Image (cartoon, helix red, strand yellow):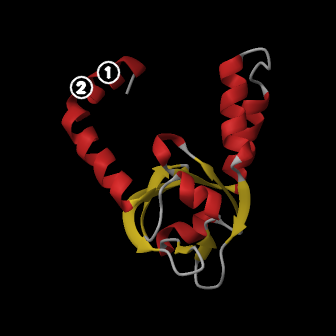
Amino acid sequence: MFMGEYHHSLDSKGRLIIPAKFREELGVGAVITRGLDNCLFLFPAEEWEALETKLKTLPLTKGGARQFVRFLFSGATECEMDKQGRINLPANLREFASIEKDAVVIGVSSRIEIWSKENWETYVSAAEESFEDIAENIVDLGI
């Protein structure tokens, strides 16, 4: 399980250090893609395959389902860590997430999210203001 928040900077080649606590669970192969809320999603290969299996069951006749699948898969690329625990963030994904130099890497259960420092700070600030309302709504989901 991935959890925690870590701050890192991209190097001049667009590589990002993956926190040591995440490296073993991430494994050898991984998939990075556009995520929601203008961040990037980084999945271990097994989690990506499980997600892919679920997405294949969505009906092609539903426009929203087609859009969601296109959004995830068109931005997806396989990536591997180098010996220093870095992954390359492709330019199109860096641009999508507005990551220029400083990034925040967070663990979100079965995936890793990569945010620009600025977007993460804005998101956290807004979420803190509505956290109690969100918690009350989650109760309806049985949590």
Q: Is residue 33 above or below residue 138?
A: below
Q: Amino acid at mark 2?
A: Asp
| SS label for mark 1 | helix
Residue hosting label 1: 137
Q: Nearer the viewer, residue 107 or 36?
A: 36
Taking the spot 77% from the left edge, 25% from the top edge, the residue there is 57
Q: Which residue has dot 2 on it? A: 133
Nearer to me, 79 or 38 = 38
Q: Is residue 59 left or right of residue 133?
A: right
Marks 2 & 1, CB-CB < 8 Å contact: yes
The answer to whether residue 29 shows anywhere in this view is no
Residue 98 position in % (x across, y down): 47, 56
- Residue 72 at x, y = what percent? 67, 41
**In this picture, residue 98 sits left or right of residue 53:** left
Q: Residue at x 52, y 80 (%)?
A: 11
Quadrant of the rendering where the C terminus is positioned: top left
Badge 1 crowding class, 10 Å Cα cut-off, few under 14, some 14 to 19, many 20 or more, is few
Residue visible at 37% across and 69% down in the picture: 7
Q: CA distance from mark 2 to mark 1?
A: 6 Å
Q: Nearer the viewer, residue 79 or 71?
A: 71
- Amino acid at dot 1: Asn
Looking at the image, is 21 positioned above or below residue 63? below
